[in-house]
Amino acid sequence: MKLREIAHTRTGDKGDTSNISVIAYRIDDFALLRQAVTPAAVKACLEGVVNGDIVRHELPNLGALNFVLPNALGGGVTRSLALDAHGKCLSGLLLDLEIS
Amino acid sequence: MAPDSIRIGSGAGFSGDRIDPAVALAEKGQLNCLVFECLAERTIALAVRAKRENPSAGYDPLLEERLSAVLPAAIANKVTIVSNMGAANPVAAARATAAIIRKLGLGPQKIAAVTGDDVLARISPDSPLLEGGTVAQWPGQLVAANAYLGAEPLVQALAEGAGIVITGRVADPSLFLAPMVHAFGWCWYDWARLGQGTVVGHLLECAGQVSGGYFADPGVKDVAGLAELGFPFADVAANGNAVISKLAGSGGCITAATCKEQLLYELHDPASYLTPDVTADFRGVRLEQRGPDRVAVTGGGGAARPEQLKVTLGYHEGFMGEGQISYAGAGCVGRGKLALAIVQERLKRLGHEIIDLRLDLIGVNSVAPTARAPANQREVRARVAARTRTLEGAAWIGREVEALYTNGPAGGGGVSQFVKPLIGTASTFVPRDEAVPQIHWESVS
C-alpha cells in the first residue's frame, strides 16, 4: 500500500534544508512507519532531490517521524531556480512511498 | 495581579496572508493580544534595499492596509498588537502606524518600535557561516545581517505600556512568548515554562496552518470552509498549558492531526528547537482533542537558551529570469522538450552572463526531477529559469521563450515571463552583546 493510506505529511523549509514530518493516522501504525519509512526509503522516493544525508527523528508520543533533508532546496528558497523553491510539494511526493 | 489565563490570536502567518480572518478575531475573539508574523527569510534583505532608496520605507508593504482594517476593532476591544512588520525599518513602521491611528481617530495609543536586530556593521568578513566557509567567501554582495532577537525587549515594551509593538527580526515564537511572559511574569530562567510557551507560539506562528490550512487532502483529510478559514487563538494558562481554538462558525478545523503537522513544521531536532529565549524540547508534547476545534497542548519543555544569537545574512546574488510556454495533445512532451532544447541553445549566446540554468517540463518533472511522462500526457508546460549577473540577462530568458511563439515547436501558447533580483541567505552567529535591543516610542494623544 501507499504511505498515504496510513499517514499524513507536511514539509517545512529552513535555508537549503527541508524537513518532512510523517504522522500516523492511528498511533498503532507508528511501528510500521518506523520499520518502513527509513531515510534510505525517503531518499529513493525523492530521487534526485536530496543531496545531503537524511536524518530521521522519532516522536513516539505523536506517532510521528521527522525527516531532515539537507541540501534539498537548490541552495534555499531565496536563490533556488526550482518552481517550488520551498519544496512544499515534497510531502506529497512522499505519500507515494510503497510500504509493506 | 497576574491573570489566570490570556488569549493570544494569530493574525497572519506570512506577509501576504489574508486580512479578514484577523479582523474577525479582533472583533469577536475576546483576545488579549493579536500577533502578526509577516517576515520571511529573504523579506528583510529586500526591505533593506527599499530603505536604502527611501529612508521612510523598508517595512512591510501591506502594513497600512492590514492595520487600517484591524486596528479599529483591536483598539476598541483593548487587544494588544505585536508584529514583526517593521522588517528593516521598525521606527518608520511605528510612525506609519501612528499616522493610521491619527487618521482613524483611534488615539490615545503608545506604539513601541523594537530595533537592534540590524548587525550588518558588526559582522566580520572572517565570521564562520553555518553553511561552511566565511562571510567573505560566500558568493554575492552582503546587503543585510539581522540577528534574531528574543521576547525580552517586547516584554519591556509591553510593561512600559505599549498597545502596539512593532519589531524587525525577532524569532517567530518569541512574538507569542512575549505576551505570555508579560502577563504571567515568568522568570527568564524558567526554561520549562519558556519551552512550553515557545511550543504554543510555534503552533500559532503560521496562523491558518494550524486551523486546517496547508492540510486538506480530499478523500483522506477533508477540511470544510477553507475559503473562510478561521485563524487560531490560544487560551494560555499561567503554567503555560494552552488550548488552541478558533472562532465558532469560521472555516477550517483544529484537530490533534492539524496540530501535530504544525508542531513539526520547520522543525529539525525535536529535542532542541533553538530560539533566543530557550532551547525548547518538543519530545514530551501532548496534543489532546478537548472538543470540536479545541486541542489542548501540554508537555513542552526546555533547557538553557543558546549563548549566541543566530544571524540571517542577505546577499545580492544577481537576478533570476524565467519563461514558460504550454504544449498540448499528442506529442506534447516531445514538443516541450524541443522547446527547452532550442532555448538552451539560444542562451549559449549569453555566455558568462548565465550563472545557473534550470529546465523543467511542468506536469512531468518540475517537482520530481527524475519522473517520466506517461504515454497519454495531455499537456505540458516548458519552463526555463536562470540566474544571471544582470537584469538585462534575466530579461533575455523570458524573451527567448516568448520568441518560441513564431520560431519554436508547433502549437506553443500561453507564454509568461518574469524577472526578479535574487537575495541569497546564509547564517552566522553573534554574541548577544552585539545585538542590543532598543525601544523607540511613538505616541498618539
Image (tube, rainbow, N blue to C red):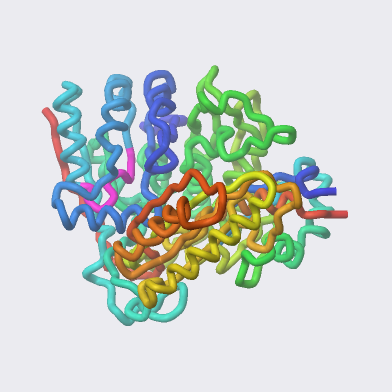
In the image: residue B393, left or right of residue B197: left
Residue A61 visible, this orientation: no
Q: Residue at x 38, y 33 (%)?
A: B34
Q: Based on the displayed image, in which of its 4 quarters is residue B68 positioned?
A: top left
Q: Residue at x 54, y 39 (%)?
A: B209
Please report the bounds of the magenta region as a residue range: B82-90
Q: Based on the displayed image, in which of its 4 quarters is residue B419 positioned?
A: bottom left
| Quadrant in the picture for the C terminus of chain B | top left
The front one of A73 and B417 is: B417
Classify B95 as above or below B172: above
Residue B403, position as x, y percentages in the image = 42, 55
Name, please, the residue furthest toward the right. A100
Name, please, the residue furthest toward the left. B445
Q: Is B89 one of the magenta-colored residues? A: yes
Q: Is B67 one of the magenta-colored residues? A: no
Q: Residue at x 38, y 65 (%)?
A: B424
| Quadrant in the picture for the N terminus of chain B | top left
Residue B185, position as x, y percentages in the image = 38, 42
Q: Based on the displayed image, in which of its 4 quarters is residue B139 positioned?
A: bottom left
Residue B214, position as x, y percentages in the image = 57, 40
The front one of B394 and B65 is: B394
